[in-house]
């Protein structure tokens, strides 16, 4: 029932995103530079929460736009109703809905749905990760120099030592391709599927990574913070890899050769 509700919510939100894509909708800016929100974010969020509340009215909800709906339930739904809003607002179909379910502080289920590519990623703790019901695994590359990476650039950290631009500069000067798609949830799923060998970002929120980090873990990858501690979606830094390039990429991020 929990997984059924998760998939129903993801598909409902994806339908709203798809039906309104390249249409006319209101766009506003939250605090910060290019921190957009559209009425589609809000409509998607409402559809997800309505479905959750219909089936699990007592569950805790953490969602990007409305914040926390606090209860004393052991279950928490962590929702990004439209990850990649800037892409969506500009008609770029690299965006998705991301929903993770936490039980007693541990992520147990996650779904990431891109309705434009018709890609539904699902992860269950201890049962693997799938793309459209087919198992996915991380890549097998062991050489960082031949890897393909993906990242994001939080605008507020650009000038920090070993910040996003410093790390990007270090990697591309080694000839390592580094992409920026604009959706952390998709980045993580594509690491899980072996399309990318690693993903790093200096600052994320729980809703950005809750489902995606479980995807990578269940696909056989490794996820830590920049100090090589086990990853929690409630701390900002994330490094997710196939495991084989993890130490080398971690050294590069931290300014070590």
Image (cartoon, grey):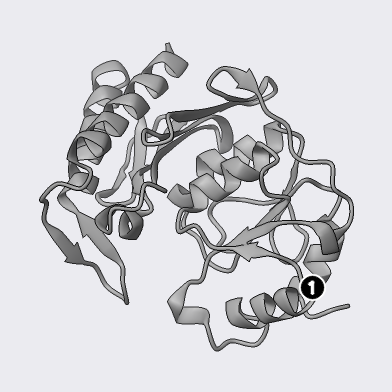
Q: Quadrant of the C terminus?
A: bottom right
In the rendered image, residue 170, in percent from the top left (x then y), is placed at 73, 80
Q: Label 1: which residue?
A: 252
**Which residue appears at 49% of the width and 57% of the height?**
181
In the rendered image, residue 105, in percent from the top left (x then y), is placed at 56, 38
CA neighbours of label 1 inside 10 A, class few (<14), some (14 to 19), many (20+): some
- On the question of residue 22 being in view, the answer is yes
Dividing the picture into quarters, in which one does residue 31 lie?
Answer: bottom left
**Which residue appears at 25% of the width and 40% of the height?**
45
In the rendered image, residue 30, in percent from the top left (x then y), is placed at 24, 68
Of 173 and 29, nearer the camera is: 173
Question: Does 53 sit above or below residue 241?
Answer: above
Q: Quadrant of the N terminus?
A: top left
**Which residue appears at 71% of the width and 75% of the height?**
172
| Residue occupying the far top of the picture | 1
Of 203 and 36, nearer the camera is: 36
Question: Does 42 sit above or below residue 176?
Answer: above
Q: Is residue 172 left or right of residue 55?
A: right
Of 67 and 83, nearer the camera is: 83
Question: Does 1 sit above or below residue 44?
Answer: above
- On the question of residue 238 being in view, the answer is no
In the rendered image, residue 179, in percent from the top left (x then y), is placed at 59, 62
Q: Is residue 61 left or right of residue 164?
A: left
């Amino acid at each position: 029932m929990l997984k059924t509700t998760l998939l129903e919510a993801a598909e409902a939100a994806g339908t709203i995103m798809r039906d309104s894509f390249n249409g006319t909708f209101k766009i506003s800016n939250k605090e910060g530079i290019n921190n957009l929100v559209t009425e589609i974010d809000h409509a998607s969020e409402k559809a997800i929460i309505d479905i959750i509340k219909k089936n699990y009215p007592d569950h805790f909800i953490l969602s990007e736009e409305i914040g926390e709906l606090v209860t004393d339930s052991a279950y928490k739904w962590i929702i990004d109703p439209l990850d990649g809003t800037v892409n969506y607002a500009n008609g770029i179909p690299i965006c998705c809905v991301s929903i993770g379910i936490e039980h007693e502080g541990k992520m147990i289920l996650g779904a990431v749905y891109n309705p434009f590519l018709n890609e539904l990623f699902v992860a269950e703790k201890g049962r693997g990760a799938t793309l459209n019901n087919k198992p996915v695994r991380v890549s097998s590359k062991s050489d960082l120099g031949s890897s393909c990476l993906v990242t994001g650039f939080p605008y507020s950290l650009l000038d920090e030592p070993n910040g996003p631009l410093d790390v990007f500069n270090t990697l591309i000067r080694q000839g390592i391709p580094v992409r920026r798609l604009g959706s952390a949830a998709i980045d993580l799923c594509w690491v899980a599927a072996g399309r990318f060998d690693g993903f790093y970002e200096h600052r994320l929120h729980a809703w950005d990574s809750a489902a995606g980090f479980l995807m990578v873990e269940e696909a056989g990858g490794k996820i830590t913070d920049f100090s090589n501690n086990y990853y929690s979606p409630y701390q900002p830094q994330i490094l997710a890899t196939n495991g084989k390039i993890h130490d080398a990429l971690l050294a590069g991020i931290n300014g070590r050769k």
